Image (cartoon, rainbow, N blue to C red):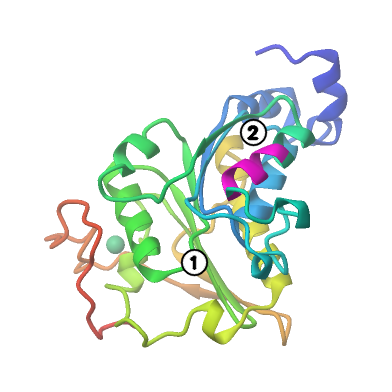
Amino acid sequence: MNLTDAQIERYSRHIILPEVGGKGQARLLAGRVLIVGAGGLGSPAALYLAAAGVGTIGLIDADTVDLTNLQRQIIHATPDLGRPKVDSAADKMRAINPDVRVITRRERLTAANAQAVLKDYDFVIDGTDNFPSKFLVADACHFAHKPYSHAGILRFDGQTITVVPGETACYRCIFQAPPPAGAVPSCSQAGVLGVLAGVMGTLQATEAVKFLLGQGELLTNRLLVYNALKTTFRNVPLKRNPSCPLCGATPTITELKDETPATCDLK
Ligand code: ZN
């Protein structure tokens, strides 16, 4: 891929980096990233990936923009209230960078559509906000062999890990199954610092860019835990769990399902 003069100028601060260069920028432009959820995590991820010139960005989200979203979902603005989130987000991304092809799906990711939704992408960003969706993304990426970035946020705490299916510890190696409904409060029940979503979603975008470039070390086999009140980042080393129900030696999850039985063995 030959960059145009305008692209060389637009991406000059990338191209000047030896780890990126013209070749790396061409890789970004050829890259395809799916963002599941155009909310608190998906907003900064989508903005940065569009600005970075990731050539194809998919967005899947069924929701419309609500007033309570605007405290942290920075891709949406007050005039977008009531609009589908994918439309609001796509407008901003296209305005930032006309090089980017934004593919929107106004629906939820489900076991039924996951294969078709994921198949055209190189990397997936999990920007969902509830446990069933996070486990569905984890399982769907496993079965589709798609590397992905998980992140979760609540109150002042965030956690993130990157998973390369079949190679590195997966989400279910750590958390075998979703907690029982109601056991862990949601952001709407317990609150979340808006900026926290920006920090974690931006880390996820960084992982996607590094993956596309083939540079650096991905956040694999360790969970990065951020506490905004204390400004601490902790690395929790992890290994693949041989008895993981998804990627272990004798997996019990052998096909994608929407509902995962709730158990109490969240660790
Ligand atoms: Zn696993």
On the rendered structure, is 81 left or right of 132?
A: right
Amino acid, disc 2: Val
Q: Which residue is mark 2?
A: 54
Q: Where does the magenta region start and end? A: 85-91
On the rendered structure, is 156 left or right of 187?
A: right
Q: Residue at x 43, y 69 (%)?
A: 130
**How would you rate the neighbour count of disc 1 (Cα within 10 Å): few for under 14, some for 14-19, many for 20 or more?**
many
Q: At which x and y percent is residue 141?
A: 35, 48
User: Which corner quadrant of the figure contains ligand 1?
Assistant: bottom left
**Outermost front residue:** 82
Q: At which x and y percent is residue 156?
A: 65, 82
**Residue 146 to residue 134: above or below:** above
Amino acid, disc 1: Asp
The total number of labels drawn is: 2
Q: Tag on residue 97?
A: none
Asked if ligand 1 lies within 8 A of label 1, the reply is: no
Which part of the image, by quadrant, shows the N terminus?
Answer: top right
Q: Secondary structure at mark 1?
A: loop
Asked if residue 231 can be seen in this view, the reply is yes
Q: Residue at x 57, y 54 (%)?
A: 64
Which part of the image, by quadrant, shows the C terminus?
Answer: bottom left
Q: Earlier in the sequence, mark 1 or mark 2?
A: 2
Q: Quadrant of residue 100?
A: top right
Asked if residue 166 can be seen in this view, the reply is no
Q: At which x and y percent is residue 110?
A: 32, 51
| Predominant secondary structure, magenta span | helix
Q: Is residue 45 magenta?
A: no
Q: Residue at x 66, y 45 (%)?
A: 88
The reply to whether discs 1 and 2 touch (Cβ–Cβ < 8 Å) is no
On the rendered structure, is 196 left or right of 15?
A: left
Q: Tag on residue 129?
A: 1
